[in-house]
């Protein structure tokens, strides 16, 4: 019975798909003599053209193409080709249920996937390093709070801020803004001078009341 096999050829730079030759062994050429301008029709050559093969080899001999030989998989751990094929499908996403085993193609796909994975890992490493540098910058100058009862220093205040929840930081920011507005109003109205003057008036009133109570003093 004729066997159909594929012999892959070296891939060129302009090839959109790997070139191959259709090999039919244990068979003889099937040519039909026709009339008109095409006196001979080659059945296998027509098939090769339809499937995109570069050519066709038809021979009555038995031809074993190493890439298509499953006997070479006896060295697979456990000797189970089905398990090997399933692993290839899981790891590389290649459906091996109907395809002729193509170890070279599988290895090429694996290498390309590894290159993509390595590039992705490198991007993740760069992002991680950038995030670590940014985190270090945010923590620069801070000092941990050791006693909650003591008013924190600026460095300790930053330490608390960096570890506060988003809700707590929003509340703290609102308090700071309110304090800035009140402080600005106090400065513009010169409340400190007013307080000093009022204190002086209070002291003067107290002194007068004391004099009234003690007229002989």
Image (spheres, grey):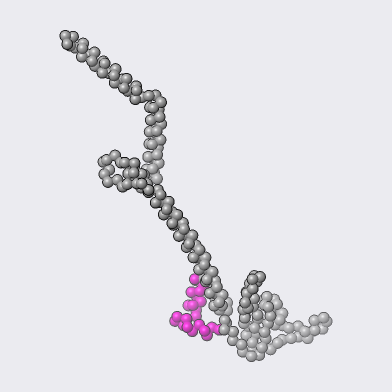
- Determine whether, in the image, residue 215 is placed left or right of residue 134: left
User: Does the magenta segment cover residue 86?
Assistant: yes
Q: Is residue 15 above or below residue 155?
A: below
Q: Please state the horizontal and vertical placement of residue 32, each as a whole percent of the image.
A: 76, 85
Magenta region: 69-91
- Determine whether, in the image, residue 60 is placed left or right of residue 157: right
Q: Please state the horizontal and vertical placement of residue 75, each as a whole percent of the image.
A: 47, 83
- Determine whether, in the image, residue 130 is placed left or right of residue 207: right
Name the residue rendered at 49%, 71% in the picture: 91
Q: Out of 184 and 64, give the one closest to the viewer.
A: 184
Name the residue rendered at 67%, 84% in the picture: 57
The secondary structure making up most of the magenta span is helix
Q: Out of 82 and 165, give the one closest to the viewer.
A: 165
Name the residue rendered at 50%, 68% in the picture: 114
Query: As drawn, which residue projects farthest toward the top?
Result: 216
Q: Out of 166 and 196, give the one closest to the viewer.
A: 196
Name the residue rendered at 62%, 85% in the picture: 3
Q: Is residue 164 visible?
A: no
Which of the image's four quarters has the N terminus? bottom right
Q: Is residue 22 above or below residue 186?
A: below
Residue 95, by quadrant, is bottom right
């Amino acid at each position: 019975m004729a066997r159909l096999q594929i012999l892959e050829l070296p891939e060129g730079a302009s090839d959109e798909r790997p070139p191959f030759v259709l090999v039919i062994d244990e068979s003889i050429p099937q040519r039909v003599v026709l009339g008109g301008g095409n006196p001979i029709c080659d059945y296998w050559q027509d098939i090769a053209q339809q499937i995109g093969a570069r050519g066709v080899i038809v021979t009555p001999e038995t031809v074993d193409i190493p890439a298509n030989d499953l006997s070479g998989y006896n060295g697979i751990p456990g000797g189970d080709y089905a398990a090997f094929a399933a692993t290839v499908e899981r790891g590389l996403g290649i459906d091996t249920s109907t395809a002729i085993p193509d170890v070279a193609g599988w290895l090429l796909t694996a290498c390309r996937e590894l290159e993509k994975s390595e590039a992705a890992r490198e991007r993740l490493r760069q992002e991680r390093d950038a995030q670590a540098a940014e985190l270090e910058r945010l923590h620069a100058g801070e000092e941990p709070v050791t006693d909650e009862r003591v008013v924190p220093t600026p460095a300790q205040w930053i330490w608390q801020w960096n570890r506060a929840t988003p809700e707590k930081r929003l509340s703290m920011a609102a308090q700071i803004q309110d304090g800035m507005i009140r402080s600005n109003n106090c400065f513009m109205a010169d409340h400190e001078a007013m307080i000093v003057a009022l204190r002086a008036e209070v002291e003067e009133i107290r002194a007068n009341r004391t004099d009234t109570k003690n007229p002989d003093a």
